[in-house]
Image: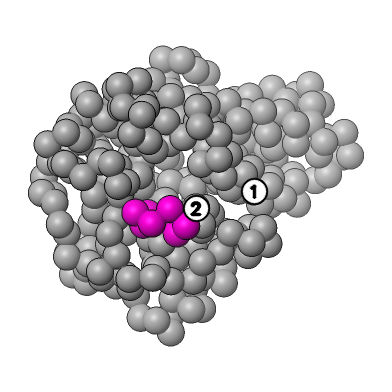
Amino acid sequence: MVLSVNMFVIDNVVWIRLGSFAGIFLLMAVWEIAAPRRALRTQKGRRWFNNLSITVINSLAGRFIFPFQAAALALVAQERGLGLFHYLHVPSLPAGVLSIVLLDLAIYLQHVLFHRVRMFWYFHGMHHTDLDIDVTTGARFHPVEIVLSLLIKMGVIVLLGTPAWSFVTFEVLLNATSMFNHGNISISTAVDRVLRLIVVTPDMHRVHHSVIIGERDSNFGFNLPWWDRLFHTYKGQPREGHRDMVIGLANFRDPKRLGLVRLILLPFLERKNF
């Protein structure tokens, strides 16, 4: 039964991910129009073109560099008994749930690492050059960072023995929550206070995109909000408030210098400014 579920997931992983991405993106885009949190300060059309083009480039890069799906690696690990959960004979359901939690922890630690280590920051910093923050920012990552992140996740898959269905579920959740917590959407303070106990909310993550370095180096979580509190990287609110806070990086304020080609080349051409 477990094997058949894993095979179904692997055979349909592209459609599962594409369908979930399109659905969540459409929902968030409509929500942003109906109830925006902040007034956008730059031209939306230019930003959306850049951010969505980067999303397509990242998808193609991932498929070209890794012609096999990471979920297929999970199936290989299962067949060969690789990973902690297989060694301990942990059933698929608890192994899958624990894998989702531990993968989320790995992404949190990766995120902190990409801020702390200069070489990685050159690439991750491109994500922070967005002068506004909305649903498309959640997919604005440099292709090199995407490849490095995938390598890290593949390492975790083999180390844990993550079930294929669990990894695909995690990827769907990661994409969905990334679009959600980057969303320019208004949520009441009372609802946000409850939500951020179980998931990273837009108001919580927006602090992370502040131009103020002390705020930027906080709230690293994507899915689960617990890691920031556990590792003391949590900051409740931005100093200037959500409507007045400045988004982006101090040395990258000209939208005309943040076109698609230049964004890809930023880590190589603008290192002195990061």
Residue shown at 89%/39% (left/top)?
A: 88
SS state under label 2: loop
Residue 261 in which image quadrant: top left
Tell me: 227 left or right of 241.
right
Residue 91 pos. (x, y %): 80, 45
- Identity of the amino acid at label 2? Asp
Residue 2 versus residue 135: which sits nearer the camera?
135
Location of residue 62 with respect to 51 vertically, above or below: above
Q: Is residue 27 visible?
A: no
- Identity of the amino acid at label 1? Leu
Mark 2 = which residue?
A: 217
Residue 258 in which image quadrant: top left
Residue 216 pos. (x, y %): 44, 54
Residue 18 pos. (x, y %): 36, 39
Q: Give the numbered dot on residue 105.
A: 1
SS state under label 1: helix
| Highlighted magenta segment, given as a residue range | 209-215
